[in-house]
Image: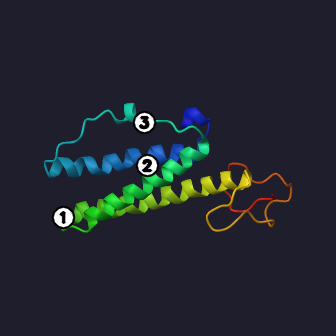
Amino acid sequence: YLKAFDVQRPFSNLERTEATHIELLKPLLEEYNVTIPTENWSSKVVVPSSLEAAYAAGVETEKKSIEVYEGYLDQTLPEDVRLVFERLVLASERHMNALQRQLDGVACTTGREIRNGSCSQSGNQNGRGNRGLGQRFCMQ
């Protein structure tokens, strides 16, 4: 998405933290003798048709990740594994919120309603909105 839409945040932050997630899981997989998947996932990435679609896809992906992690947390797990999944849930919640703010900002600048109502007249005073900043308020 960084190249396709010429944006850095939040995708650059997400890319960095996803690498951290992998690094958190690797030692656990090795310790518990679980084979580390070798699938070439990057070849399966489909770039959405718009930045707005990329944000929306990211929100949905994080929701699904949270569901998967919480499913593991419903099981009896060794404490070190539980701790990692708890950290992954928190990180995915932060990612989802960051992506949702960006999605709300795109909807706001295009005049579409956002998740908790419509854009507010109390936003910035230049009448142009807060393009791409993920702000909740903008001028119509």
Q: Which mark is residue 140?
A: none
Q: Residue at label 1?
A: 78
Mark 3 packing: few (<14 Cα in 10 Å), some, or many (20+)?
few
Circles 2 and 1: CB distance less than 8 Å? no
Q: Looking at the image, is mark 3 or mark 2 earlier in the sequence?
A: 2
Query: Distance of mark 3 from mark 2, alpha carbons?
Result: 18 Å
Identified at 21% across, 67% down, the residue is 75
Residue under label 2: 17
Residue 43 sits above or below residue 111 on the image: above
Q: Earlier in the sequence, mark 2 or mark 1?
A: 2
Secondary element at image label 3: loop
How many marks the image carries: the answer is 3
**In terms of image quadrants, where is residue 45?**
top left
For badge 1, the amino acid type reads: Pro
Give the x, y percent position of residue 92.
43, 57
Name the residue carrying label 3. 45
